[in-house]
Amino acid sequence: MLFSTVFLALTASAAHAAPLTLNKRIQQTIADSTAKWEQACLAAGGGLKCNPQSVTSFTTLLAAAGPCEQQDAADSMIQLAQSLNNDPEMIRLTQIFAQQPRNTPNSVSVPYCQKAPASPLLAGLFQCQFQGASPTTFVGSLSVGAAGTVPFGLKSLSPLGSCKANPSGPIADGTQLVDLVQDPGVSSANGIDSTPASSVTPETSVAAPATSSSTPETSSVAVPATSTAVAPPAAISTADFHLQNGLDAQKLNAQFKSLTATSSCTEGQQACVGGSFAQCVSGSFVLTPCAAGTVCAALPLVNKPGTSITCDTTGDVADRIAATGATGGVDGSASASSTSSTSSEEAAADPDSDSDCEDESGSSAETAATSTAAAPSPTASDFHAANGLQAQTLNAKFKTLTASATCTEGEQACIGTSFAQCVSGSFVLTPCSGGLVCAALPLVNKPGTSIACDTLADVQARISASGVAGGIAGL
């Protein structure tokens, strides 16, 4: 879920012109780079297209990504913005994203893409560098002047590490350019004027979006399926890709069970190791633990062939794979009886079912339909919309609750941004991880709701995907 878990947290303080003797990884919460763009996309009517593109884009900031992957992702973001009536906010935020610094494995600068972007709205834009990176040495021990050490189309860059949106120089380690600036600096990017996005003709030729994306999973941890050790499946028809996606996810999860932190890997490969997200850097897996109550797993996409890797609850992983028609549970090894669906009331009593947050005693955050105020009794054909309405009703109710509110033993809710459970007549609050909020979410394969720690954008997307309007609380 996005779950949106703090992904690749900053591990070192900022420093100017770090000496080459250091071997410090400069990292960031990469999901933050596209969070505002995703919200703008949802507001513009992008629906289920927003989160997959957001996830695909922010993963290009990882150290193992190629020098032009960030720019290619920005081209795809522009293409989606233009399909949504040239949404100016999406375009502005895309232009800033194209200039966000990338992670660096060893305190050196990251090479620049050496090709023009497909969209003229991105022409002349290139990433800033982090302050802790050496301004004169780049990945691969390249010195300024070598190929890739000067932005495309320029003969030099002054000051070193700067970009159009932040012309004064590099930005502090781990920070997000989108939080620092409002103006992407396009007026100074190779003479491009600042023509309002609404007057721009939609592009007809842009770089194709990456083949890997995520369904509305928590956008801080999902990663491209093609980066795993298992080869992508052969082309399949749109009529049967859901089942194939489920089988592919099971295959990956079975493979992940055999991996350890010392397993051999290929540069850039991504996987799950011992419940943590893993990326291969310099021939070894670097592990990033998932948030409390979640595990790393492969999930089937819902809108096209493929899988994603995400931190999610075991109950949600099982449900999503089961929804494709694949049997055998998370890795295909469970019996059919152990993976059959239960009613929403049974789910509420099962501490492993769709639990997206857990209290200190390990109880499930699952909320059954019967525990809410009067709600419609959905049929098999319309429960998705009923689930969405039910989630909105809960979220509206949660807005009125405080830590001192009266409660019934075992009752679960959201208070502020924290998960709350009633113990001995009083709510006990458990804060969600950084960047996440507590909210009610509609289940996707059966009637009912769950209470989840998730990103605000993902909550909005999931409720919208159920077919209801009015946002998180139906207001």
Image (cartoon, rainbow, N blue to C red):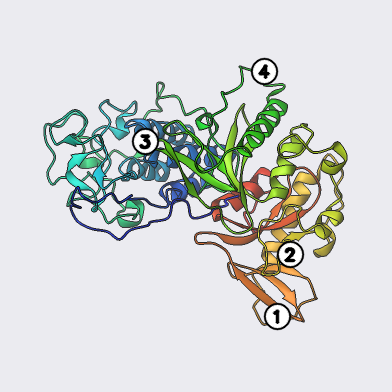
Inspect the image, locate mark 3, and give the three-letter code of the amino acid beneath it: Gln
Can residue 325 be seen in the rendering of this structure? Answer: yes
Inspect the image, locate mark 1, and give the three-letter code of the amino acid beneath it: Ala
Near mark 1 (Cα within 10 A), the count class, few <14, some 14-19 or many ≥20, is: few
The disc, 1 or 4, on the residue closer to the chain's N-terminal end is: 4
What is the C-alpha distance between the residues marked 1 and 3? 47 Å
Residue at x 60%, y 59% (from the top left corner):
292
Inspect the image, locate mark 2, and give the three-letter code of the amino acid beneath it: Ser
Q: SS of the residue at dot 2?
A: loop
The disc, 3 or 2, on the residue closer to the chain's N-terminal end is: 3
Q: Is residue 219 above or below residue 126?
A: below
Tag 1 and tag 3, C-beta contact below 8 Å: no
Q: Of 46 and 309, which appears nearest the observer?
A: 309
Q: Which residue is mark 4?
A: 237
Q: Looking at the rendering, which quadrant does residue 250 occupy?
A: top right
The disc, 1 or 3, on the residue closer to the chain's N-terminal end is: 3
What is the C-alpha distance between the residues marked 2 and 4? 41 Å
Q: SS of the residue at dot 3?
A: helix
Q: Which quadrant does the C terminus fall into?
A: bottom right
Q: Which residue is mark 3?
A: 70
The disc, 3 or 4, on the residue closer to the chain's N-terminal end is: 3
Tag 3 and tag 4, C-beta contact below 8 Å: no
What is the C-alpha distance between the residues marked 3 and 4? 30 Å
- Left or right of 442 on screen, residue 431: left
Q: Which residue is mark 1?
A: 405
- Left or right of 227 on screen, residue 304: right
Checking the image for residue 363, the label placed there is 2
Inspect the image, locate mark 4, and give the three-letter code of the amino acid beneath it: Ser
Look at discs 1 and 3 and give the one toward the viewer. Answer: 3
